[in-house]
Image (cartoon, grey):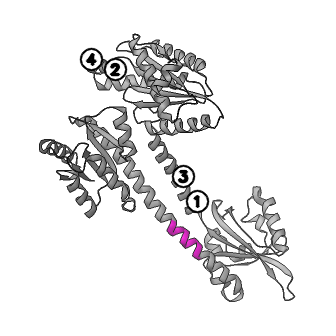
């Protein structure tokens, strides 16, 4: 995979390039954002790693420019930075950044971030390829349908050679003509099906009633197009797009019907695979890879929805922000792998104990959050206290885990979700000042000030 590096520090640029090349990446580097933008415009890269702070065009501006080239396909953008504030990270995400790498460079973290990037880029590439293939198959299907219509107009001349399975039937479903394409699709030869009922051959027993209704519709002079599952001679089934048309006698009366069946089994399979891939991609886009909780972006979306409902007067809600106590000290003592285990453990406790209908998310770092729909402040405090106790009593092989909680309820004077987050953050600060491992709200005057 090709990677573009934008780093104004020569030593850092060399270290990052060497690390990427050792991992098997094809790397091109630029000394600043402007040079990187020129390289990207000439030949877009699927992955860009850029320093945040650079003279002239910084990492944020480079990210915005990359995102402006939508027709070039998706580029995964990682910012290399020593910044760790929530405001900076949120600003970067809003500018289009996908992920972050901490300075100084940690190879294990680099490998982890790149693994996520490859999965998402590979998924996006497969989805794009399958979409193009499905469009081609859809075009082919439309062409086949046009051929069916032409065959219906010139039935006597072209029936046997039309490249779509066709057969004619009477009001009772008895087959009178059967073309070569029908033999290829269903496996029965013409002599095996003539004067036999479609209900004894290709129509499944569970579809009998529906097909009888369609035949009655045809005998009344009306056509019908729809998808169905037909039976083959060997007992297998095929998905088909079935078109039914009335056949008229010399006096204009309906004397029977003709059915043209296009095999769409592969298209149905591709659609199922595409739906599964789309669901997987959506899950990756809104799930935190470490904890399995909603990520920061998904949390912001849920928070905005709840805030909009509250502004319309539909229902109030509360927001809980919690921080694992002394998490940095835990990492320094036991290592980052142990820290990751603690984050996953706390996430599991929150998921198992949060009320039904709530949204649990990883806010960032060791901070997590819970959105509580239809919860007044008093109720939310009770929920937060229950969660605090659940965490504090959960066994841990290293040392006991505790967390500090800040709780805020939506108030009518709040203008945006960020006002509510600020109140919860201020309440969390009060919990830390009170000695940690506790739950704190803010009084209304303090809430107004924080918001």
Q: Residue 173 is drawn in which quadrant?
A: bottom right
Q: Residue at x 55, y 30 (%)?
A: 413
Give residue 333's mark: 4
Could you tell me if residue 61 is visible in this image?
Answer: yes
Mark 4 or mark 2: whose residue is earlier in sequence? 2
SS assignment at label 4: helix
Disc 2 designates what residue? 327
Give residue 300's mark: none
Mark 3 or mark 2: whose residue is earlier in sequence? 3
Q: Could you classify mark 2 by the number of other residues whose Cα lies within 10 Å: few (under 14), some (14-19), or many (20 or more)?
A: some
Residue 137 inside the magenta-drawn segment: yes
Residue situated in front as seen by the camera: 351 or 160: 351
Q: Could you classify mark 1 by the number of other residues whose Cα lies within 10 Å: few (under 14), some (14-19), or many (20 or more)?
A: some
Task: Find residue 68 and report its horizontal and vertical position in percent.
Answer: 37, 57
Q: How far apart are the two marked residues, 4 and 2, measured between alpha carbons?
A: 10 Å
Compared to residue 272, the image places residue 306 above or below, namely above
SS assignment at label 2: helix
Give residue 268's mark: 1
SS assignment at label 3: helix
Q: Residue at x 46, y 64 (%)?
A: 132
The magenta stretch is 135-143
Residue 157 inside the magenta-drawn segment: no
């Amino acid at each position: 995979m090709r990677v573009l590096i934008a780093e104004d520090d020569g030593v850092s640029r060399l270290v990052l390039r060497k690390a990427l090349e050792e991992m098997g990446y094809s790397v091109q580097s630029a000394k600043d954002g402007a040079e990187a933008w020129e390289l990207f415009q000439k030949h877009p890269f699927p992955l860009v790693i850029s320093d945040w702070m650079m003279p002239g065009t910084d990492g944020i501006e480079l990210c915005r420019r990359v995102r402006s080239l939508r027709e070039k396909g998706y580029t995964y953008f990682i910012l290399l930075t020593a910044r760790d504030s929530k405001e900076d990270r949120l600003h970067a995400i809003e500018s289009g950044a996908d992920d972050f790498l901490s300075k100084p460079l940690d190879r294990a973290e680099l490998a982890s971030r790149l693994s996520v990037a490859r999965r998402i880029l590979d998924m996006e590439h497969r989805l794009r390829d399958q979409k193009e293939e499905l469009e081609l198959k859809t075009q082919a299907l439309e062409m086949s349908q046009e051929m069916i219509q032409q065959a219906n107009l010139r039935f006597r001349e072209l029936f046997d050679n039309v490249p779509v399975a066709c057969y004619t039937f009477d009001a009772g479903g008895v087959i009178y003509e059967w073309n070569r394409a029908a033999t290829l699709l269903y496996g029965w030869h013409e002599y095996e099906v003539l004067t036999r009922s479609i209900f004894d051959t290709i129509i499944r027993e569970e579809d009998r009633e529906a097909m009888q209704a369609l035949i009655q519709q045809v005998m009344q002079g009306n056509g019908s197009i729809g998808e169905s599952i037909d039976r083959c001679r060997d007992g297998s089934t095929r998905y088909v797009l079935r078109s039914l048309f009335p056949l008229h006698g010399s006096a204009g009366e309906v004397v029977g019907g003709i059915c043209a069946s296009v095999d769409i089994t592969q298209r149905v399979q591709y659609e199922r695979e595409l739906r599964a891939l789309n669901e997987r991609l959506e899950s990756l886009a809104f799930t935190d890879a470490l904890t399995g909780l909603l990520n920061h972006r998904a949390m912001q979306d849920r928070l905005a929805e709840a805030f909009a409902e509250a502004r319309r007067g539909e229902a109030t809600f509360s927001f809980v922000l919690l921080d694992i106590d002394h998490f940095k000290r835990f990492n320094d003592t036991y290592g980052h792998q142990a820290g990751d285990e603690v984050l996953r453990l706390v996430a599991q406790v929150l998921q198992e104990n949060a009320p039904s209908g709530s949204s649990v998310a990883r806010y960032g770092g060791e901070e997590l959050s819970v959105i509580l729909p239809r919860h007044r402040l008093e109720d939310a405090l009770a929920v937060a206290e229950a969660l605090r106790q659940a965490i504090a009593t959960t066994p841990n092989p290293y040392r006991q885990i505790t967390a500090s909680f800040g709780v805020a309820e939506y108030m009518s004077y709040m203008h945006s979700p960020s006002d509510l987050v600020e109140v919860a953050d201020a309440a969390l600060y009060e919990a830390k000042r009170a000695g940690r491992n506790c739950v704190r709200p803010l009084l209304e005057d303090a809430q107004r000030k924080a918001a």
